[in-house]
Amino acid sequence: MVINAEKSEFNEDQAACGKLCIRRCEFGIEEDQEWLTVCPEEFLTGHYWALFDGHGGPAAAILAANTLHSCLRRQLEAVVEGMMAAQPPMHLSGRCVCSSDPQFVEEKGIRAEDLVIGALENAFQECDDVIGRELEASGQVGGCTALAAVFLQGKLYVANAGDSRAILVRRDEIRLLSSEFTPETERQRIQQLVAFTYPELLAGEFTRLEFPRRLKGDDLGQKVLFRDHHMTGWSYKQVEKSDLKYPLIHGQGRQARLLGTLAVSRGLGDHQLRVLDTNIQLKPFLLSIPQVTVLDVDQLALQDDDVVVMATDGLWDVLSNEQVALLVRSFLTGNQEDDPHRFSELAKMLVHNTQGKDSGATGEGQVSYDDVSVFVIPLHSQAQEGSGH
């Protein structure tokens, strides 16, 4: 379910879901691809869900919702022969150049799931390139976070670039399936970028060092707490004039901003985004590559009420993982298993809880002023479909 919290004229949250049909390809003598579409058995099928939380307008999120699944299908089709093999071959064409190739692949620990992970990473990058070209051609701007889940060959792959989140909720377990990428969580990567690789990106306007607060003129000459790219702990340094510049990363928690502008450090788009009143671009600091978590669903003793909850940050701003799990368990216990709409109704209920409604189970009643999008994925039915196919 998607709800517009009216922070903007258009809903900056976008969602997409559907069935993935991956065509198998064979390579002839000259390694030309011939698509085998004679019958459905020649397809590898899976399912796809994705959430896109836009900023700077809805354009990037809309493009991502209409594009990422196509990019993913193309990337999977490029490696599907390797995915179907007992062990991914060194040469996709089947040619054997070195008799020890299988051993080299095994020593690297390369499995079929690594090809799916690579396809997701390449799909995000391809989608980012498409968004960049389309927005430039149309004179539009903006970016979005991206959280995608793919169920394929008995495994759920969760790919995240941004601050949306996915969790597994079971009767006696909550498992985090994604990590948020914000200026705070990626502080060291961003600091290192300007410390060694591209110091000119700061254009002399920012300091890469982190301090507990922004320094003032009265701090000059004093020894204050700080940390740099190589530090997870803190130390003291004597404040110099250059330390008084605006911090590369400023703020705490959800208020942290990169270059005083952006609250996320990964996502799609933002090719034209610049710091206000400067020519400093933010794109070089951002990554479009997701972190991919793999859940081996076939290895779980699944119950009917085991679900994955995917949501944009509007949900997690006001509800913790534990609160969401409590709401999920309470709802599913009180709703009949044969109700075909129970998981859709559960998603609606979670969204309503961000609007200060139905707060009995958590006793909170907090309100999110962000757009909120939620998917609830029942794993039991996915596993049954997968084994049936």
Image (cartoon, rainbow, N blue to C red):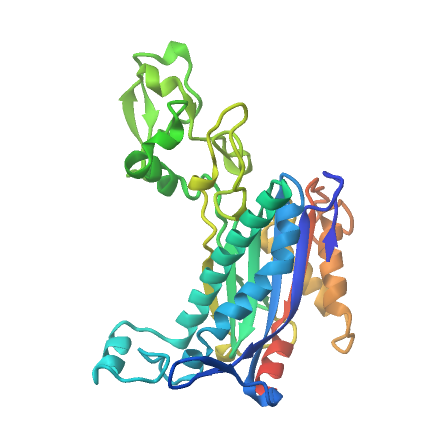
Nearer to the camera, 239 or 108: 108
User: In the rendering, at what x and y percent does residue 308 appear?
Assistant: 60, 65
**Residue 349 visible from this viewpoint:** yes
User: In the rendering, at what x and y percent does residue 81 appear?
Assistant: 44, 81
- Asked if 134 appears above or below 310 in the picture, the reply is above
Left of 36 or right of it: where is 335? right
Q: How many marks?
A: 0
Left of 246 or right of it: where is 51? right
Q: Quadrant of the N terminus?
A: bottom right
Name the residue located 51 percent from the left edge and 56 percent from the top edge: 160
- Asked if 179 appears above or below 182 in the picture, the reply is below
User: In the rendering, at what x and y percent does residue 32 appear?
Assistant: 44, 80
Nearer to the camera, 24 or 223: 24
Nearer to the camera, 121 or 96: 96
Q: Give the residue furthest to the top.
A: 218
Name the residue located 21 percent from the left edge and 82 percent from the top edge: 100
Q: Quadrant of the C terminus?
A: bottom right
- Asked if 284 appears above or below 129 in the picture, the reply is above
Left of 275 or right of it: where is 227? left
Nearer to the camera, 299 or 189: 189
Left of 333 or right of it: where is 238? left
Q: Give the residue furthest to the front.
A: 30
Name the residue located 51 percent from the left edge and 37 percent from the top edge: 253
User: In the rendering, at what x and y percent does residue 252 appear?
Assistant: 50, 33
Residue 169 picture quarter: bottom right
Name the residue located 50 percent from the left edge and 82 percent from the top edge: 34
**Residue 177 visible from this viewpoint:** no
- Asked if 191 appears above or below 385 in the picture, the reply is above
